[in-house]
C-alpha cells in the first residue's frame, strides 16, 4: 500500500476523513508501525494541549469572564439601531418579504375590485339612486305577530306595549310535553 503523508494522518486523528477513507486508513495503520507511532504521538499532543488550555481557562477569574461578556454585550448593543427611523428600517429589513407580499396582495385586490366595479357599475346605476331609510329603533314601527303555526306543538304569542316601546314574546311548546312535570 502506498505510504500516507502526515496531513492524512492528522486528518485521521482529528476525525476529518470521510468514513470510507477512515476505514481504509485504519487498515493501512495495521501494517505501518511508524504511522501508528506518529498517531499515538499526535493523540498525546492533543491531550497535552487540551489539558493546558483547560488549565488556563480554569485559572482565569470569573470576574474577568464577566468583563469579557460585558464587552461583547456592549459591542452588540453598539450595532443595534438607534432612533425611531433606524428601528423602523431594521424592522423592515427583517420583515421585508412579508411587507412586500402584503403590499403586492393589497394592490392585486384593489386592481380586481376596480375591474369588477367598472364592469358592474352599468348594471347598478339604476339602483344606486334609491336611498335606504335608516331610523333609530325607538322611531320604527314594531312588527306585530298575532299567530304562529307550529307543527307538532303549540305556539303562544304575547304582545306588550309600555313606555319603553313594544315587545313581542313567542312561546313554543312541543306537543309531546306533559303538563305538570
Image: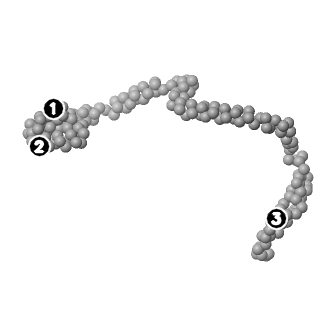
**Which quadrant holds the N terminus?**
top left
Q: State the separation of the CA atoms marked 3 and 2.
A: 98 Å
Residue at horizontal 20%, vertical 33%?
49
Badge 2 element = helix
Q: Which mark is residue 31?
A: none
N-terminal-most mark, 3 or 2: 2
N-terminal-most mark, 1 or 3: 1
Q: Nearer the viewer, mark 3 or mark 2?
A: 2
N-terminal-most mark, 1 or 2: 1
Give how far across and how far down residue 99 sits, in percent.
Answer: 57, 32
Q: Label 3 near label 1: C-beta < 8 Å?
A: no
Residue at horizontal 20%, vertical 41%?
22
Label 1 crowd (10 A; few <14 / some 14-19 / many >=20) = few
Q: Which mark is residue 171?
A: 3
Task: Answer whether residue 51 is visible to the viewer in this image.
Answer: no
Q: State the separation of the CA atoms marked 1 and 2.
A: 16 Å
* Horizontal relation, residue 165 to residue 71: left or right: right
Occupied quadrant, residue 127: top right
Residue receiving disc 2: 30
Residue receiving disc 1: 6
Vertical relation: 113 (above or below) 166: above
Q: Label 2 near label 3: C-beta < 8 Å?
A: no
Amino acid at each position: 500500500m502506498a505510504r500516507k503523508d502526515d496531513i492524512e494522518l492528522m486528518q485521521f486523528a482529528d476525525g476529518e476523513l470521510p468514513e470510507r477513507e477512515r476505514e481504509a486508513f485504519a487498515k493501512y495503520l495495521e501494517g505501518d508501525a511508524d504511522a501508528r507511532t506518529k498517531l499515538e504521538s499526535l493523540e498525546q499532543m492533543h491531550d497535552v494541549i487540551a489539558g493546558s488550555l483547560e488549565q488556563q481557562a480554569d485559572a482565569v477569574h470569573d470576574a474577568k469572564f464577566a468583563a469579557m461578556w460585558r464587552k461583547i454585550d456592549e459591542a452588540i448593543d453598539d450595532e443595534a439601531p438607534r432612533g425611531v427611523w433606524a428601528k423602523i428600517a431594521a424592522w423592515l429589513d427583517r420583515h421585508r418579504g412579508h411587507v412586500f407580499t402584503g403590499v403586492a396582495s393589497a394592490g392585486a385586490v384593489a386592481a380586481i375590485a376596480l375591474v369588477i366595479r367598472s364592469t358592474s357599475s352599468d348594471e347598478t346605476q339604476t339602483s344606486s339612486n334609491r336611498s335606504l331609510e335608516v331610523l333609530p329603533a325607538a322611531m320604527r314601527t314594531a312588527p306585530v305577530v298575532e299567530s304562529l303555526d307550529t307543527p307538532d306543538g303549540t305556539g303562544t304569542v304575547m304582545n306588550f306595549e309600555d313606555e319603553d316601546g313594544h315587545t313581542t314574546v313567542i312561546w313554543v311548546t312541543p306537543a309531546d310535553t306533559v303538563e305538570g312535570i
